[in-house]
Amino acid sequence: MHPFTFLACTYNLGGSFGWQQRRRPLERFLEQQRPDVLCTQELSPEACELINDTFPWTRRVEDPFTGWTEEGNVFWDSRLFHLVEYGAEDIGILEANRRLFWVRLGREAGSTIVVATAHLSWTGNLREVTERVNVRVAQAEMAAGFLEGLAHPKEPVLLMGDFNDHIHPLRMLRLAGFDDSFMALGREPVITYPAFSIAGQSPEVLDWMLHRGPIRPALTSVVDFYVGGVAPSDHKPIVTAYTMMEGDEP
């Protein structure tokens, strides 16, 4: 068995709002961090184009469903991985076009990994306000159940994204065998929102990277990044180096 280490990142890109001001900061972030796997939320067609222009060897899922260009997608370095299959699973997220976006990526060594991204519902949604129910609990349970059925035995799984929560979805996912990059390394979770001061907005840990199976984080960090005082998004990205074992069993 041989270790393979790669750099993964999750980033809520903030859609198209203020894109002209945020374009250069995002480009510089990508150039400096150079993730091998990038999971996005609140994606935009402009950001899709920028990512692929910055890294010509990067690939993403290209599909007619609008969610793949305006909500979430997975980008990967085609020199390290190739696409085996992909899908967009409905896990009950209330916002239109949001899904559990996933890919199965293969390696030349014959190993595969499932990578999924999700943007769980905002706490201010109508159902949560009127019914007093945390809708992200069921969404997290559905995500865990789907990935359980999707993953092969002993296949690494990464699940990351903006969970809009720091308690209940994490509890459900941990019960399903997932661990987050912070706790796995004995570190306290770090604030990911907002990236800059917003009046009346309390700092929160909304973004997460979780793993299950034969894969472990080696380093993880929430990145503060600005160009000329402008952040690429109102969320901060998380960047994690993961190591997985691949090759024949000894």
Image (cartoon, rainbow, N blue to C red):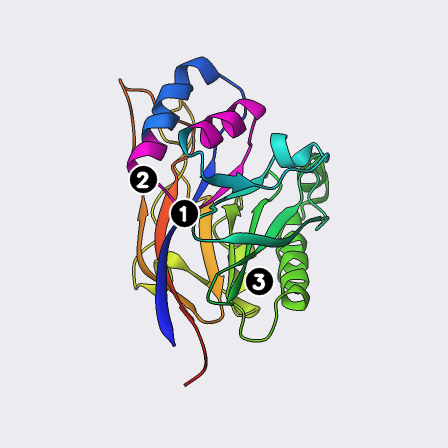
Dot 1 amino acid type: Asp
Query: Is the C terminus in the top left, top right, bottom left or bottom right quadrant?
Result: bottom left
User: Which residue does the numbered mark 1 point to in the structure image?
Assistant: 36
**Residue 13: x and y, percent?**
48, 31
Crowd rating for badge 3 (residues with CA inside 10 Å; few <14, some 14–19, many 20+): many
Vertical arrangement, residue 54 with respect to residue 153, above or below:
above
Is 52 placed left or right of 176 in the picture? left
Dot 2 amino acid type: Gln
Crowd rating for badge 2 (residues with CA inside 10 Å; few <14, some 14–19, many 20+): few
User: Which residue does the numbered mark 3 point to in the structure image?
Assistant: 172
Vertical arrangement, residue 44 with respect to residue 95, above or below:
above
**Residue 190: x and y, percent?**
33, 47
User: Which residue does the numbered mark 2 point to in the structure image?
Assistant: 33
Name the front one of labels 2 and 3. Answer: 2
Q: SS at mark 1?
A: loop
Query: Is the N terminus in the top left, top right, bottom left or bottom right quadrant?
Result: bottom left
Between the C-alphas of marks 2 and 3, the distance is: 31 Å
Crowd rating for badge 1 (residues with CA inside 10 Å; few <14, some 14–19, many 20+): some
